[in-house]
Amino acid sequence: MSSLPVAAAPPAPQTLEKKPIKFSNLLLGAGLNMFEVTTLGQPLEVTKTTMAAHRGDSFASAIGRIWSRGGVLGFYQGLIPWAWIEASTKGAVLLFVASEAEYYARAAGGSEFVGGIAGGVAGGVAQAYATMGFCTCMKTVEITKTKMAASGQAAQGTWATFMEIYRREGIRGINRGVNAVAIRQMTNWGSRFGLSRLAEQGIRKVGGKNETEKLAAWEKILASSLGGGLSAWNQPIEVIRVEMQSKKDDPNRPKKMTVGNTFKYIYDSNGIRGLYRGLAPRIGLGIWQTICMVAMGDMAKTYVERITGEKVTAKH
């Protein structure tokens, strides 16, 4: 009597683990962000902001405008302390909040793509309201203040500018444009995390790799670059943010700027192209951030593990 074939047991479902937030992860994120912004990050940020604020400028004329403000140092306006504060804190805020949100979204039955978007959205909003609102505002103020320079006066120092805004407008003045920053970060990180996850899945399928196999460094860079580059679709929000925070003189600007009336002002003044000014340096910034966080991440992990004695588990 022949025996009946025994059906193969279904594969055990993959258990979802909640990854702990370690000091070593936070140190690594802060260190890589500080390196990124201090090298090419801030020059690209200054160029992007200048083009978004002066929407009639070409890329070349924006470079000339920045150079005229102080040569090479003109490309590093707003670096100390605002960009350093932002760089050293935003990674920690993002890691804490995005990790929690992604875990709960996956635990509720969401796919890796949905979990990535949920983590990015929550982390981006937390970044904006925790530190990025006042940091981006002060960076933009320093980059776009032109009235004193045009009249031949010495430009105000960093803290003098900060205190003048605080005395005149209070906390709301320091955080001007924070809602636009939140929308940008929410859509930016939601897109970047989600699209990077999709790109990784595509690369695994093409390369015949399963979920447990590690991607090569170039594959990680390619996935992150695709996610970062495609997430620049929300550039109009970035241009709105810059306009709301800038200190350029224009009597036609709305007195009380909101996201809505700022969008209308930019569209009426410069059309649809005006809403996408600064797109090229922003894509370049995304690529540089990817190189720093992915290509240099493994080397940095080794040093951080030596310093802290902890195994670094952060994903880059």
Image: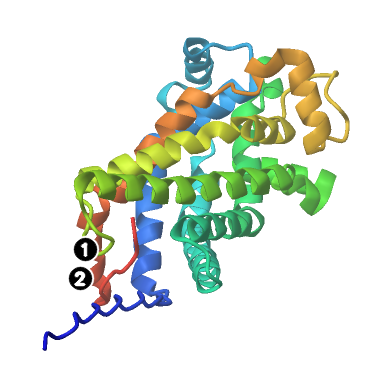
| Residue positioned 28% across, 69% down in the render | 312
Would you say residue 249 is visible in this rendering? no
| Residue positioned 31% across, 69% down in the render | 313
Q: Is residue 57 left or right of residue 228?
A: right
Q: For label 1, count other residues whose C-alpha is less than 10 Å away and answer few (under 14), some (14-19) or many (20+).
A: few
| Residue positioned 67% across, 45% down in the render | 183
> Disc 2 and disc 1: Cα gap in Å?
5 Å
Tag 1: amino acid: Tyr
Residue placed under numbered mark 2 in the picture: 306
Would you say residue 131 is visible in this rendering? yes
SS class, disc 1: helix
Q: Vertical placement of 186 versus 73: above or below? A: below
Residue placed under numbered mark 1 in the picture: 303
**What is the x, y in percent for residue 102?**
51, 65
**What is the x, y in percent for residue 236?**
64, 30
Quadrant location, the C terminus: bottom left
**What is the x, y in percent for residue 160?**
68, 43
Q: Are marks 2 and 1 in contact (CB under 8 Å)?
A: yes
Q: Quadrant of residue 129?
A: bottom right
Q: For label 2, count other residues whose C-alpha is less than 10 Å away and answer few (under 14), some (14-19) or many (20+).
A: few
**What is the x, y in percent for residue 66?**
51, 20
Camera-nearest residue between 29 and 231: 231
Q: Vertical placement of 52 versus 273: above or below? A: below
